[in-house]
Image (cartoon, helix red, strand yellow):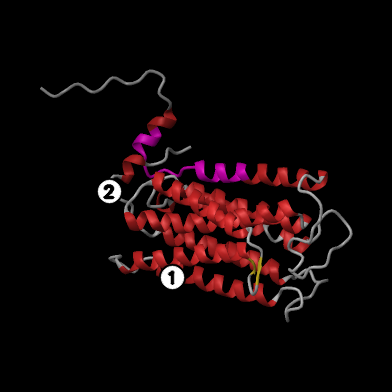
C-alpha cells in the first residue's frame, strides 16, 4: 500500500505553491532589492549634499578636469554620469530574477546588483562635493566592487561557500581602505586607486585559472568584453585628467564621465560572464523564492 500524501499546510499561500511547482518562474526579489537600494541611497545623497553632511570642499576629485560651476554640485557631468552604475545595477537585478540569470552561488546575483547600484551614489558623493568624506565613500564603493570580483572568483576556485566569500570581501575592503590612506602616487593619483587596481588584477588572474580548468568556452565573449571595456575606460580616465589631452573643463562631455559609463558596461559584462557558469550540484533545491 502506498504511503498517504502529506497533509497540506493550512493557510499555505498560492505564492508558496507556485514557487514549489514552478522553480523556473521569474523572481522579482533581485530587482526589488536593487530598486530599493537605489531609491534610498540616492535620496540620502541628495539630502547629504543639500545639508552639507559630507563636509567642506577640500578638492577631492578636482584632478578630473571639470570646472566648478556656481551651485551645490561641483562637477555636474561627472556626478550625473554615475547614474550609469545605478541603471546597470537595476539591469543586473532584473536579469538576475531569470532562471538563467543566477550565479553559481545563490543569492550573490542580488548582492552584486546592490554593489553596482551603490557605485553610483558612492562616486557621486565625491564629484558633487569634492569633500574628504565624499572621496572616502567613492573609494569604498570601488573596494567593494573589486573585492566582490576577487572573493567570488576565489570561492569558485577553492570550492568554499558564501561564508568564506563574506570573510574575504570584508578583508579585501579593509585592506584597500588601509592602503588608500598612504597618500598620492604617480599615474593612478593615489594609493586607493592602486589598491583597487591590484585587487581587480587578482580577480582577473583567478578567473583565468578558473577558465583554464573549464570544460567549455561558454561566456568567453562576455569576459573579453568586460576586460576590453575596462582597458578603454582606463585609457580615457588617464587622457582626460586635468591638463591631459582630452581635458575640456567647460564641456558637458567629460572624459571622466565616459569612464563611469564604460565601467558600468564592464560591470554588466562581468555579471553576464558569471551567469554562464554551471550551477553546483544541488543548487536547484536552494533556489531563491519567486515574488
The correct choice, above or below, for 89 with respect to 19 in the image is below
At a point 56% along the width and 51% down the height, the residue shown is: 115
Task: Kindly give the residue lying farthest to the right in the view shown.
Answer: 70
The answer, for residue 91, to whether it is visible in the render is no
Q: Main secondary structure of the magenta part?
A: helix
- Residue 221, label in figure: 1
The correct choice, above or below, for 289 with respect to 241 in the image is above
Residue 137 belongs to magenta span: no
Q: Which element is circle 1 on? A: helix
At a point 42% along the width and 50% down the height, the residue shown is: 102
Q: Which residues are magenta?
A: 18-37
**How many numbered circles are shown?**
2
Reading the image, the residue beneath label 2 is 281
* Residue 113 percent across, percent down from the top left: 53, 51
Q: Nearer the viewer, residue 46 or 184?
A: 184
- Residue 233, label in figure: none
Amino acid at each position: 500500500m502506498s504511503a498517504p500524501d502529506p497533509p497540506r499546510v493550512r493557510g499555505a499561500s498560492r505564492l508558496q505553491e507556485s514557487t514549489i511547482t514552478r522553480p523556473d518562474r521569474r523572481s522579482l526579489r533581485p530587482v526589488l532589492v536593487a530598486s530599493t537600494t537605489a531609491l534610498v541611497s540616492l535620496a540620502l545623497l541628495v539630502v547629504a549634499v543639500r545639508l552639507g553632511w559630507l563636509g567642506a570642499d577640500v578638492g577631492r576629485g578636482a584632478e578630473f578636469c571639470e570646472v566648478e560651476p556656481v551651485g551645490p554640485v561641483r562637477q555636474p557631468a561627472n556626478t550625473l554620469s554615475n547614474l550609469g552604475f545605478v541603471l546597470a545595477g537595476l539591469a543586473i537585478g532584473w536579469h538576475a530574477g531569470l532562471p538563467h540569470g543566477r550565479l553559481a552561488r545563490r543569492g550573490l546575483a542580488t548582492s552584486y546588483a546592490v554593489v553596482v547600484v551603490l557605485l553610483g551614489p558612492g562616486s557621486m558623493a565625491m564629484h558633487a562635493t569634492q569633500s574628504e568624506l565624499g572621496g572616502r565613500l567613492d573609494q569604498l564603493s570601488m573596494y567593494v566592487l573589486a573585492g566582490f570580483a576577487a572573493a567570488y572568483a576565489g570561492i569558485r576556485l577553492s570550492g568554499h561557500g558564501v561564508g568564506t566569500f563574506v570573510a574575504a570581501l570584508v578583508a579585501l575592503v579593509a585592506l584597500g581602505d588601509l592602503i588608500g590612506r598612504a597618500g598620492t602616487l604617480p599615474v593612478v593619483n593615489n594609493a586607493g586607486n592602486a589598491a583597487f587596481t591590484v585587487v581587480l588584477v587578482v580577480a582577473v588572474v583567478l578567473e583565468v585559472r578558473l577558465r583554464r580548468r573549464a570544460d567549455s568556452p561558454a561566456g568567453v565573449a562576455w569576459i573579453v568584453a568586460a576586460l576590453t571595456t575596462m582597458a578603454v575606460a582606463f585609457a580615457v580616465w588617464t587622457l582626460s585628467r586635468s591638463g591631459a589631452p582630452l581635458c575640456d573643463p567647460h564641456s558637458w562631455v567629460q572624459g571622466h564621465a565616459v569612464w563611469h559609463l564604460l565601467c558600468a558596461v564592464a560591470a554588466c559584462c562581468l555579471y553576464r560572464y558569471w551567469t554562464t557558469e554551471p550551477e553546483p550540484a544541488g543548487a536547484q533545491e536552494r533556489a531563491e523564492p519567486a515574488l
